[in-house]
Amino acid sequence: MSEWYTPEFGMSFGSKWTRAIKVIIVANVGVFILELLFSTISSRWGVPGLGEGVRVWTQDPFTRLFWFYPPDALGNLWLWQFFSYTFLHSIYDPWHLIINMFALWMFGADVERAMGTRKFLTLYFTAGVFAALLSALLLPQTAVLGASGAIFAVEVAFAMLFPNVTIILFIFPIKAKHLVMLFAGLTALNCLLPIGGGVAYYAHLGGLLYGFLFVRYEPRVWGLVSLWQAKQRARELREGEEIRRRVDSLLDKVNRVGLENLTTKEMEFLQKASQKFRKWKAVSTSGGPGTKKEKKA
């Protein structure tokens, strides 16, 4: 993250179109068109619904294949649903897509610039997975679709990175940190006192919580990962040096008494060492031990 970056918040259309934001918005709009297409086809062909006891907003097989429905995603291991559901939106409420994409456009570009595209995409998609898991834990028979969980995480990230930036909410100015507090309070209230309306408040809550955890603890997590990787490299280097010493010793023995006088175990060791050396050589550029260096969300 660049600590010198400051957002130019406002209705500046050019500055908001960062690379990841363009791709995500175009993908969401494209998938929405596919939803409309498959819904129209299914309604004309009379495709049956899922049956009783399951809340659904559509009966077309395209949506059922790609929304997040816990019995399918977890029970049938349709694991792609953890990611694909964030690209689907309610075809009966176009504002679901419009509001989500507008929020992503408003907040996401500055977060992407501050974090970098790779880290931003990591935040966005892992937040979607976390939001789906929380929703599945609390509402295991309810389908979810929409990008809101991931977008709430982006909004939290914005508020933590730029807490004192002023945002115009309708006609009222409000600081980013206070706006996210307002979102969190309303989401928690709706989780405690659900009013229905087909909104996945638990997924929203998951996104809010994950955005906070990601910004606060992600540097520490990667620090621990880097430390573990360094220890692994050191261990592999020690192993490589030990193998080399033993190989040198066996080669000296071959020079003295000949290859035919090696034991079966010594021959097997030389073969395995040769395989490891070839493997280390293949990954030498990476510094290996053989180198010198549906609810709508």
Image (tube, helix red, strand yellow):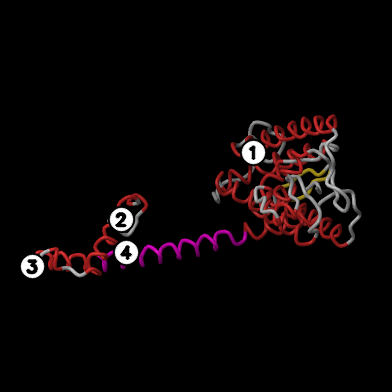
Residue 221 in picture, x, y percent from top left: 55, 62
Mark 4, residue position = 237
Q: Label 1, label 2: how many angstroms apart (C-alpha)?
A: 38 Å
Q: Which residue is mark 1?
A: 21
Which residue occupies 37% across, 52% down?
Answer: 286
Question: Can you tell which quarter of the image residue 195 is in?
Answer: bottom right
Between disc 1 and disc 2, whose residue precedes?
1
Above or below for 93 versus 77: above
Q: Is residue 111 left or right of residue 250?
A: right
Indicate whether residue 240 is drawn in magenta: yes
Q: Which mark is residue 293?
A: 2
Residue at mark 3: 256
Q: Sort mark 1 into few (<14), some (14-19) or many (20+) by Cα contacts within 10 Å.
A: many
Q: Foreground residue, 221 or 1?
A: 221
C-alpha separation, residue under disc 4 versus residue under disc 1: 42 Å
Q: Nearer the viewer, mark 4 or mark 2?
A: 4
Q: Upstream in the sequence, badge 4 or badge 2?
A: 4
Above or below for 171 versus 155: above
Q: Which residues are magenta?
A: 216-243
Query: SS for tag 3?
Result: helix
